[in-house]
Image (tube, helix red, strand yellow):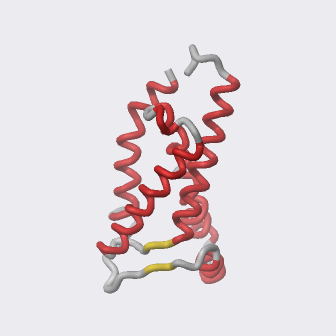
Amino acid sequence: MLKKFYQITIFPYTLFLLYLMFLGMGRFQFEENIIRIEPVFSTVKFIENTIRWWDIVRIVLGNVVMFIPFGFLGWVFPKLNDLTSLMYTFISSILIVEGMQYFTRLGIFEIDDILLNSFGVFIGYQIRRLIEKKFSRSVL
């Protein structure tokens, strides 16, 4: 039952997330293409230069939490059941999305986003494995 719910909701969730990444949260088109390739340092600078804690939590933690559901993609695509295949596929996909943000100037290509999003997928994968071990197949 849980797998069926996931299979039904992951596609609309993906569309919603793409909306947020390109048009939502007050996005606007930048005048120039921006790329940040310094891993971790750009996030540390963002935290240092941000006054409100809510903005820090929303951006940094959101980049992890919002991608946890993609750790369950093995339930929809059996070839993504192992962590290596899942991470290769996800990182390839998120690189394309970040590239599209760069070329459309509707976002910034950030290495930290790729790292944080991938960490979210990893957490989701671990949660999925825990659920599968704890509960019988009849619940899933």
The residue lying toward the viewer, choosing from 104 and 22, is: 104
Measured as percent of width and height from the top left, residue 84 is found at 57, 46
Q: Which is more toward the observer, 43 or 56?
A: 43
Residue 25, quarter of the rendered image: bottom left
The front one of 37 and 83 is: 83
Position of 1 relative to 19 (above/below):
above
In x, y percent, where is residue 124? 59, 43
- Quarter-wise, where is residue 128 in the image? top right
Q: Which residue is found at the position 59% from the left and 43% from the top?
A: 83
Count of labels in the image: 0
x, y (%) of residue 62?
A: 55, 58
Determine the residue positioned at 52% across, 25% down: 2
In the displayed orientation, state which residue is furthest to the top: 138
Which quadrant of the rendered structure holds the C terminus? Answer: top right
**Residue appearing at x 58%, y 79% in the figure:** 38
Q: Is residue 12 above or below residue 99?
A: above
The residue located at (50%, 45%) in the rendering is 70
Residue 20: % across, % down: 39, 59
Q: Residue furthest bottom?
A: 32
Relative to residue 3, is residue 135 drawn left or right?
Answer: right
* 9 on left or right of 85: left
Left or right side of 44 for 23 = left
